[in-house]
Amino acid sequence: MMLPQTINKDHVKGALVGVGICAAGYYLYKKNQNQVNDFLRNQGINVPTVNHKDYKNMSIEELMETKELLEDLIAEKEINLNQTVIEE
């Protein structure tokens, strides 16, 4: 019969080291994001670009989804703007 182990300081130390390594990796990635993404694309990995979408190569379905998303965002901003005007 196995007894459940309790968490000891080695577990905590391991978790902290893991979090630190993840944070350092994320920092390095963000600092060199363009170079890393270019390298990944050259390896055949599709890395989507957040800042720019190639609308000319999108299908009609993708364009309609984008249009609906933009309309929803505009409506939310208009509602928020109207609420702040009413509150003032």
Image (spheres, rainbow, N blue to C red):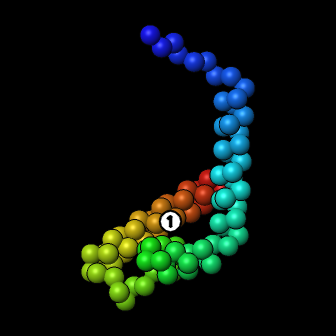
Q: How many marks?
A: 1
Left or right relative to 17: residue 51 = left
Estimate the x, y position of residue 40 in percent, counting from the top left.
52, 74
59 or 25, which is in the foreground? 25
Disc 1 residue type (three-letter): Glu
Q: Residue furthest top?
A: 1
Q: Residue at x 66, y 30 (%)?
A: 11
Left or right relative to 68: residue 17 = right
Q: Is residue 63 above or below residue 69?
A: below
Estimate the x, y position of residue 87 in percent, counting from the top left.
62, 53
Left or right relative to 67: residue 43 = right
Q: Residue furthest bottom?
A: 56
Quadrant in the picture for the N terminus: top left
Q: Residue at x 39, y 85 (%)?
A: 55
41 or 83, which is in the foreground? 41
The answer to whether residue 28 shows anywhere in this view is: yes
